[in-house]
Image: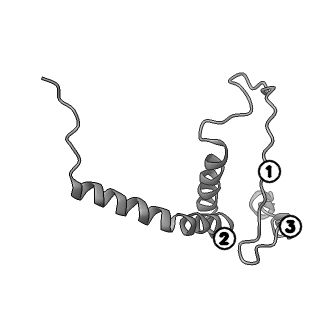
Amino acid sequence: MSVGRKRTTEHEKDAIKQFNALIKKHSLDAVENIVKISNRAMDENVRLKANVWIAEKLVGKNYSIADVEGNVQDNDINIVLNVRNATTNDSSEVWEEDNSDLDDWGKDLYTPSH
């Protein structure tokens, strides 16, 4: 006696079709939201997770340009990533981080007291 998957009922088939249609309808909105999160989230860990998700969708979760020993693979791989400002859709704007307020960071903590 073999035990296999139970047959899908007509009701279940219809529910699956409705589910897939709903996913297709809202998938672009979901990806746009992830891109916004990757650019705008206040928490850098949230931004990192969103960017990792995007990168994994582009090149795959297990992708590595180097082998286990750290040797770069000889494969010709060209990846073009166009990052656009999420509000203006402008790819010419370059975001440069201003760390000038961090230049003196820690000096007050490690100044020897006399």
| Mark number displayed over residue 38 | none
| Mark number displayed over residue 80 | 1
Mark 3 sits on what residue?
94
Mark 2 sits on what residue?
40
Q: How is the image coloured?
A: one colour
Crowd around label 1: few <14 · some 14–19 · many ≥20 (10 Å): few
Q: Are marks 1 and 3 in contact (CB under 8 Å)?
A: no
Residue at x 78% of width, y 26% of height: 73
Left or right: residue 45 compared with residue 1 = right
Which image quadrant is residue 69 in?
A: top right
Q: Mark 2 or mark 1, which is nearer the start of the sequence?
A: 2
Q: CA distance from mark 3 to mark 2?
A: 15 Å
Left or right: residue 10 compared with residue 107 = left
- The x and y percentages for residue 87 are 72, 77
- The x and y percentages for residue 6 are 19, 40
Q: Are marks 1 and 2 in contact (CB under 8 Å)?
A: no
